[in-house]
Image (spheres, rainbow, N blue to C red):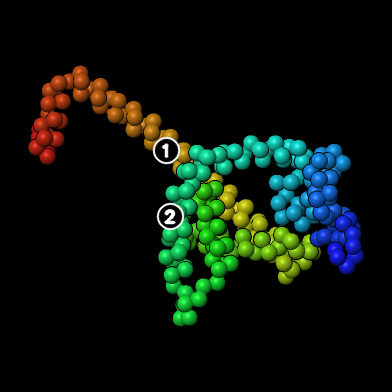
Amino acid sequence: MAKHSSDIFKTSLMGEKTAVLCGPSGNKFLFSNENKLVHTWWPRNIERLFPTSVVHKSTREQFINMRKLLPGFIKPDSLRNYVGVMDSIAREHLETHWECGGRENIVTVLPLVKKFTFAVACRLFLSIDDPVHIARFDKPFCVLAAGVLSVPVDFPGTRFNRAIKAADSIRREILEIIRRRKSIIGLLIGGHDTASVAITFIVKYLSELPHIYDKVLEGETNGCYTG
């Protein structure tokens, strides 16, 4: 910037023609003309990696959806609920990764912080707290993160190609989690209905048949059932 002495210039970012506006005046122009003279756009690599998130949605729709989602996560009541969870994860993370720095007692901060923030995200957004499961998620997410800002060349062996495969793997894993939880919900509903009906009939018959109730009470009192 100092070399060319220009607050506005054209360049190419990730294969897309881009105009760069710098300084307070540039920021003011962008933010005061959002959805008027300028609008949000997604480069081709983002569209390829996250197709369901960006295709067929206008910027206004995305903004409205984001405004609906964010308050539930960042409102004070929710944040207070997260503090305890994040504190327990931080303590466990420090004990596991930071207090054992190897032979030289050295820890590399950046990768460990990434592991911590990823563990927090898995716990809060996906309710996953199993370290093995988190580790299985972590590898493809690292590959995906490395490929998000790469040149969108989809050839085998390229960073972008590996990111596409990692994104597909993550989607399959999340869909499998959703499928399992749907099955669990079905079992819970079925178990709730059948158990509640059975208990209701037991209470009904015990109230209508006092001699049976007395036998049941006697068995419970003595620790065993008789006759």
Left or right? Give the position of 171 relative to 190: right
Q: In which quadrant of the rendered view does residue 213 lie?
A: top left
Residue at the farthest bottom position: 103
Instruction: Determine whether, in the image, residue 214 is placed left or right of residue 32.
Output: left
Say above or below: 226 vs 21: above
How many C-alpha atoms fall within 10 Å of the one at disc 2: few (<14), some, or many (≥20)? few
Viewer-proximal residue, 195 or 54? 54
Amino acid type, callout 1: Leu
Q: On screen, 214 above or below 60?
A: above
Across and down, in percent, residue 124 comes to: 52, 48
Visible in this render: residue 35?
A: yes
Q: What amino acid does circle 2 point to?
A: Ser
Q: Position of residue 170 (x, y in %)?
A: 61, 56
Q: Earlier in the sequence, mark 2 or mark 1?
A: 2
Residue 148 % position (x, y): 71, 59
Determine whether, in the image, residue 146 is placed left or right of residue 9: left
Q: Which residue is mark 1?
A: 188
Which residue is nearer to you in this view: 57 or 24? 24
The residue carrying mark 2 is 88
Tell me what residue is drawn at x 28 percent, y 25 percent: 201
